Structures are given as C-alpha cells and as structure tokens.
Image (tube, rainbow, N blue to C red):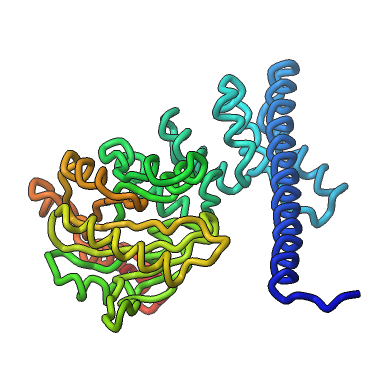
Amino acid sequence: MSELDNNLYKEFFNEVIGRINSARIEAYKSVNYQQIRQNYDIGRMIVERQSKFGWGKSVVEKLSKDINQIYDGIEGYSSANLWNMRQFYTEYCENTELLELALNIPWSHNILIMNKIKDFSERKYYLFATQKLAWSRAILLNQIKANAYEYHLKNPKQNNFDLTLSEHFSEQANEAMKSVYTLDFIGITKPVLEREMENMLIAKIRDFIMELGYGFCYIGNQYKIILNNKSYKIDLLFYHRILKCMVVLELKTVEFEPEFAGKMNFYIDLVDSQLKQVDDNPTIGIILCPEKDNFEVEFALKSYNKPIGVAEYRLTKELPENLIGKFPTVDEIKQKFLNEGIIDKNDKKHNIC
C-alpha cells in the first residue's frame, strides 16, 4: 500500500464524516416524521370514537392510564399530551399544506406554534422557518415573542443574494437572514456609538446569536485582517454551520448610506481571500442599521458582486405615551401581591423583576 497523501486522506475522511452525519440527520427526520404522524393518527382515532360512541372527556384519561400500564416509563402518553394530539388532528385535518410542514418539525415545537399562533399565514411562516432553519424550541419562542412574522410582512428582506449566489444557496441565505433584528436584550433606549453597541452585544453574545438565528458561530469582534501592511477591522465575524460560510456583520448607528455597501463588499473580498476555506460557500455580508430607505438600498446593492443584505434593528421597546400611567408598575404589582398574601416577602422563588 502506497504512503497516504495527507491532503487526499483529509478530503476522503471529511467526505465519509459528511456521509455519516447526513445519514444520521435523515434517520432523525424519519423518526420524527413517524412520531408526529402517529400523534396525528391517535388524535384522529380519539375524535372518531368520541363522535361515533358519544364518549366524553373520561375516555382520554382512561386511555392514558391504560397505555402507560403497557409502555411503562415511556413518556408522551399523558392525558394532557393525548389532548394535544386530539387538538393537533382537529386543527390540521382539513389543511394538508400546514400538516405537511407540521410533520417535519418536533412535537414540542408543534405544540408551541399550535397554542400561540392561530392565523393560517402566520402559522405557516413559523412552521416553514422552523423546518428550514432548524430552530430550537427556545429560538422559536424568541421569534414568536419578537413578532418575527409581523416584521417579515412590514419589512421585506433586502439583499442581492439572487444576483450573487447560486439559486439553491441564495434561498438558504435569504431564509437565514431576517429583515429586522430585535436588540431589546442589550437594554439600549437611546442612540449610542457603534463601538458602544458592539461592546454591549459582545457582553451578551449568547442572546445576540439567538436573535441572529440557528447556526451562527461567533468568531470574533473587531476582527483584524491585514492587506499590504495595512490592517482592517471587521465589527463582528461569524461562521454559519448550516450555510457553510463566513458571515461578516457591520453595525451602524445611522441611517443606511450607499457607501456602507462598498465597504462591506471590500470586507467580503478580504475574508474570501484570506479566511474562506476551499469547501466553504461564498461569504455573506449583513449590514445592520437603525433605518433604511428601501429604494436606496436596492439601487446601491445592484453595483456589487458580493452577497450583501441590509437589515434594520429595533432597540428597547418603550410604552406608547397614551398608555403611560395606565398600567401598574412592577413595584405596584409586587406590593399588591404582598398585601393580598399571594406571595411572601421572604419567598425568593416569587421575586418579581
């Protein structure tokens, strides 16, 4: 046997690992699909028997008890979960489009969407995004609470991905990018310097990555790249595990200006030439700014050959003036609970903050 070439072997090894991982992912998807399908069918059978024989609520309690006597220790057949299965069937039995999406995401995600989202189009958005972006339940809840669907409608995504990336990768990149990012968690209520905002985001990098979405891996801030003895610093640099590409993120504290796109195009060139690996997809740039003129952004991005997206960010939400004084403060709520004996002042478990 001839001596192994390290580079050829590394390529071979990575190919084998990739195949193993893809098989495991497909196996998980298949198991998940069958579980959700099973839950749908159980819900259907409960509805059909109740309708046919006039059985009431007690049949669900009895069914749960009897199932758990056979499958002792197997979770998922509590009476509450059987009611979820019944609801799942009734809500999707006449909507095959939503059902197909629901069959491809985990059960806990389905329950969350089913209980919190009632509108057809909105539910479709969260089902589709959860499947495409592999959102964890925590991220899904974060997106729902941040009204991601509402901002998806009001603020269409602006980028040149369709002009600079392959069709398949363009779709993936577009799904990974949001039109508006919520920065409530850093507690900013007034304009700040870009470096101040960057430092606040770095201090809460875990929350920021959750807001960006699933798959972003933090590399560094003020990331230095040297070209011809001159150094340049990128605000925030990430690697996206699903898209398999570097992501350059630039923070701006002023309204979008066309020159921002030129600077971003230059940074992407630097990253592609010095950091991008042979098997990586093209580097993507995202410019975050507080405001943007959609026509100006669209016109500015036409001139560049690198994939660039421009999105807005929202700072801490303030109570509208017409509602100020009409809601009790946290201290007032806490005092009321203390006065009525709902909580004990020494009980730290019920501390309201």
On the question of residue 297 being in view, the answer is yes
Residue at x 41% of width, y 54% of height: 142
Q: Is residue 114 above or below residue 121?
A: below
Specify the quadrant of the image occupied by residue 30: top right
* Side (left or right) of 227 relative to 105: left
Q: Total of numbered circles in the picture?
A: 0
Image quadrant in which the N terminus is located = bottom right
**Between 111 and 169, the one nearer to me in the picture:** 169
Residue at x 29% of width, y 83% of height: 229
Extreme-left residue of the structure = 321
Residue at x 31% of width, y 65% of height: 267
Specify the quadrant of the image occupied by residue 246: bottom left
* Side (left or right) of 226 relative to 280: left
Extreme-bottom residue of the structure = 229
Instruction: Residue 252: give x, y in percent of width and height.
Output: 20, 63
Instruction: Residue 199: give x, y in percent of width and height.
Output: 27, 77
On the question of residue 256 being in view, the answer is no
**Between 139 and 201, the one nearer to me in the picture:** 201
Instruction: Residue 34: give x, y in percent of width and height.
Output: 74, 39
